Amino acid sequence: MSGRLIAERRYRVATKPWTDIMRELRYDRGLLTGSERFAEMSGLEQCETLKKIDDAIKTAQQWIDFYGSKRYSKPWSKLFAKKYRLMPDEEVLA
C-alpha cells in the first residue's frame, strides 16, 4: 500500500466526524434562526446563542484545516497524490 494512500485514508478518517459535526451545527443554526423561540429572544440573547454555534463551527473547521495541513508532508507531494484525492471513500477506506 502506498504511503500517499495511507495519508489519504488517515485524513478522511480524521475529518469525517468533524465534517458531520459541521453539517449538524449548520443545520441546527438554520433551524434556530427560523424558530419562534428565536424570534421571541431579545437581540442580545440571539447574538449570544448564535455566537456559541458559530464558535463550535469555527472549532470544527480549525480541526479540518489542521488535518488538512498534515495531509501532505511536502508541498510537492500533493501533485502525486491527486489520484488518491479523487478516489471515492469506499475505495480509500476499504
Image: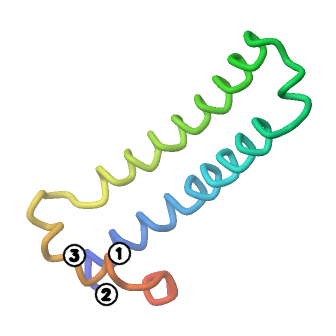
Q: Which of the marked residues, 1 or 3, is nearer the chain's N terminus? A: 1
CA separation, marks 1 and 2? 7 Å
Colour setting: rainbow
* Disc 2 packing (10 Å; few <14; some 14–19; many ≥20): few
What is the three-letter code of the residue carrying label 2? Met
Q: Earlier along the polypeptide chain: callout 1 or callout 2?
A: 2
Q: Residues within 10 Å of mark 1 (few under 14, many from 20)?
A: some
Q: Which residue lies furthest to the left in this view?
A: 76
Task: List x then y, in percent, for residue 47.
Answer: 68, 18
Measured along the vertical axis of the image, is residue 1 above or below residue 60? below
Q: Residue at horizontal 65%, vertical 46%?
A: 26
Vertical comparison of 9 with 87: above or below: above
> Where in the figure is residue 61, as x and y percent of width and height?
48, 43
Residue at which label 3 appears: 81
| Amino acid at circle 1 | Ile
Which kind of residue does numbered mark 3 sit on?
Answer: Ala
Residue linked to disc 2: 1
